[in-house]
Amino acid sequence: MNILIPDSWLREYLKTKATPTQIKEYLSLCGPSVERINRVGKETIYDVEITSNRPDAMSLVGIAREGAAILPRFKVPATLTHDPYRTDTKALVEKYQKDGPKNLKIVTDPKLNPRFAAIVIDSVKVGPSPAWLRQKLEATGIRSLNNVIDITNYLMRAFGQPAHAFDFTQIKAQDGIPTMKLRSSRQGEKITTLEGKTHSLPGDDIVIEDGSGRLIDLCGIMGAENSSIKPQTQTVVLFLQTYDPSHIRRTSMALAQRTEAANLFEKGLDSELVLPALLTGIELVTEIAGGKVASRLYDLYPQPYQPTTVTVNREKIKAYLGVELGDGEIRAILTALGFTVNATSAHIVVTVPSWRSGDVTLDVDIIEEIARLYGFHKIASRLPASEPPVVLPDPDLTWEEEIKTRLRDWGYTETYTYSLISAQLMDIFSLDKNQTYKIANPLSSEWVYLRPSLVPSLLSAAKQNLAFRPDLRLFEISMIYSYRPGNLPAEIPTLIVAWSGREFPLAKGLAQAIFALLGVNFPVDIQPPTSTYYHHSRSLALGTWGQVGEVAPELLTKLAIKKPLTLLELNLAELIAKAKPGHTYQPLPKYPPSFEDLAFILPPQTYVGPIITALKGAHPLVANVELLDTHAQTRTLHITYLSNQRNLTAEDVRPVREKLVTIAQDKFGAKLKTA
Amino acid sequence: MTDKNEIIATPYFVGMALQVQEDALVQIEGSDAPVDELRLILLGPKSELAKLTKQIMNVNPADRGQVGTVINQVKQTIAEALRQKSQTTTSAARSEIGDWYDVSAPGVLPPGGHLHIVSQAIGEITRIFERIGFTRVRYPEVDWDWYPFASLNMPPNHPARDEWETFFVTFPGTPGHNPKKQKIVLTPHTSNGQVREMEKGKLPIRMINIAKCYRRQSDVSHVPMFHQFEGLYVDQGVSIAHLKGVLDYFVKQFFGPKREARIRPFHFQFTEPSFEVDISCGVCLGRARLPNGQGCKLCKEGWLELGGAGMVHPVVLANGGIETQKYNGFAFGWGIERTYMMKAGTKLDDVRLLYSGDIRFLEQF
């Protein structure tokens, strides 16, 4: 949370000659981060970020306390003044022990509300605040409303303790006494808060009802309209409390009422601060709004704070800092922050001040305090000297990087598309929404479903780019999210490549190259893909690993794409699991190979793949068979003959050739074309 | 050439023979010399082929007959090429090609593909940490909320959860009884990998977890999907000095030797102490002033915020099944996109372009 700290107000609590620049720099290095210095007129205002574990520092006093501890570490003297914890409360409390003309009955539940303090003040004149108060509030970013409300906001900013004021006459009586009954709410109870909004409560919210049973406060978040201070109000109840933080948090989130008070209360405030803050409040209301105390001071605080202690091993301090600090220095640091220190030779026993009790509970919390005040910037920087663990790299990551690099070098361009797709895309691609993970709180209708396929995203990306590049070659490697009821999705790393145009041979060739890279045999079966995204005949399933082919024209029509597109999809997880990239040495041939080209005329619609496979395996002397040329029904095959025993003569090759021709003829009906 | 008495391996000899043949064919193709002259050079007694033939004696006796056949084939091939050459007249065009060539014409480029900058950055970051013994891992993007939250000392309804604008996933079916498996989220940071890495049960740990993360945000400097890298180091006697050492190492490797890292107090539920990591500005090098005395316009303060870090909280170690009396550690993690843009000075003014899929953008990297 960021708060604005006016320099002149800060110096009411922090006596120092430090310049604003010094305050900004030194506090940021050792404490809350002063992000900016704003100058407004003559005022210097610090914009300070205070982390959620330090509600005690979300105030002028809190920052002053940090300053008083930190600045002297940089040889700039500084002391904390007007510390509310040093207020002599006893004398003042005694003064307010007598009953006055007004009485209140307060009933509360200490589990929800550890401390409830209140007082009634009469003869109040509600009106504009004096200039000094208005200026202070405005400099810290709070709008001035009227003197009574301004005083409550002043208390919140000065001490970090929200305060509240009610119109006493609106608190209805029970048995003749105006009553405030703090309790947990029932589900569906209604309350209209002072900005005029009516809420139906989720239940188990902390509320106060009056003697007539109506709700007059949504505690810790906002007061109700019915009891709010009006211009004509003359009698006010000033009251300050602490609440169970998780209740405030839940209600504030459920109702989306993120007030500054809620922001403070949900982080856990110090009950010890309630009384000193209230006493300051009484002083201000009587002084500024002309009020007179009209009741005794009510203070319901059944379980006062019991200081806790934390024990820290000296060795551990040394281990964390990498340097040994003297006893004196540790003591000085902790004392400046309000801790009390008892040291033995091996341990330091630290008593935690009430305002840090929520945040400091472990030895490492104390180490943090010592380390930051010593100065993180002063701790030496050195790489660990210990032995690194022996860890085998994840083959998925290694191969994905390798494949991406190859694709780049082969002329493909990588894209990253969002993992989430719209309901509309799900429909166009006939994806089953009941078998797809859905975002419960989407940011936009574009990003709702965790994609079960990369095809919708990549076709969309291709479509978007067709106008820019006639020869598009895009790829992506990302997860697809496969549905598993009752479980997390299976995240499957998947490769998708898209080409503009009819590029089946390129697409299949790329698949072959990737299979070869991984040492996985390319599937020989001629099966169409199970996916309907592909052209019915110009496509091929690649075993269980993927599919390749032209995009189905109907799909292109649905997507309003006017140009043919070709796709390759590979399940990299499965492919990599089968990878056998090791290369076995083959003895170099002792004899030169001989070559021959055989042209076959194939019957219509004959696949050449099985012919090549059959011829390759037909005879041990056939080392390789490649498709050299395709023309009409003629396929010219380039045959390599090789023997490990001898030079091949025409006599050796002839019977082999005859066998090849016979196989092609008998099995496939292919006729050798003779010159 | 090899020593006279040295045995020449048969495949090597065959290779040499084929090389002689290849050289001869090239020479025949490219030469304007008369065919007779070429014949003398290529097949005559001082030819390379003749020299090779003499070395048949150095081949394993059992293979000599066979390599003899190879030499014969080579000889015939060369002779045939010479015969064909003698039938074609020397064309005027050839000599012209030999004399003049348009070296000013543009070259033929190799295929030009592009890796996305995020992939480039991931590769670079992975290599940097590999050199100091960190191994890259990857953990789920879609995870039980236990891992990115409760296991990291952020129980349900904890205010610290607000800092991450989290996407929740509608539960697929009915949750079982495991209290850690009741809610599914898109992980808003890579810290979900911390307890998952600890659960492997192997110590010490030097991990770099790089994965996609998701937050409900979209503006010029935020995208709902982005990448983070997370370092986790667990061992005995780990100090803040070690964390600083690793951060400094990374900053110098990634941003350049003149850049420095510094840590300042911060708060995370899963580290204690926690730090915010800054790097010195690349323009003013941390001085906030330029040599001409003017203030640095890029950073204003001399330092730029890089991300978060801290000493692993004992609760987190315990959730990962690690003995907190014996082991401790540090962790750090921040966005790949932001880190890369701070380095490269890409002048990218809208981070959403990274995921726009626009080829005109992708081809620039």
Image (cartoon, rainbow, N blue to C red):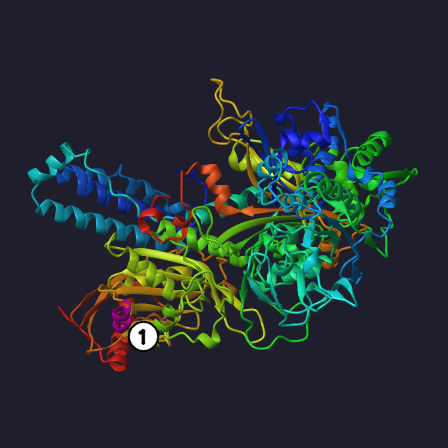
Place residue A620 in its image quadrant.
Answer: bottom left
The vertical placement of A636 against B174, above or below, is above
- Residue A429 locus on image (x, y percent): 36, 72
Q: What kind of secondary structure does the magenta stretch mostly adopt?
A: helix
**Which segment did they paint magenta?**
A552-559
In the rendered structure, does residue A322 fall within the stretch colored magenta? no
Dot 1, how many residues are within 10 Å of its Cα: few (below 14), some (14-19), or many (20+)?
A: some
The chain under label 1 reads A
Nearer the observer, A547 or A185? A185
In the rendered view of the protein, which quadrant contains the C terminus of chain A? bottom left
| Left or right: residue A153 compared with residue B167 | right
Compared with B88, A651 (above or below) is below
- Name the foreground residue: B167 vs A634: B167
In the picture of the structure, the residue carrying the numbered disc 1 is A610
Q: Is residue A555 magenta?
A: yes
Give percent across and percent down for residue A518.
46, 60
For image coordinates 20% across by 38% down, the residue present is B40
Outermost residue toward the right? A344
Left or right: A641 as drawn, with respect to A262: left
Instruction: Residue at 49%, 52% (x, y): give it.
Output: B226
- In the image, what residue occupies the spot 67% across and 46% down? A152
Taking the image as shown, residue A128 lies to the left or right of residue A575, namely right
The percent coordinates of residue A615 (x first, y second) are 31, 72
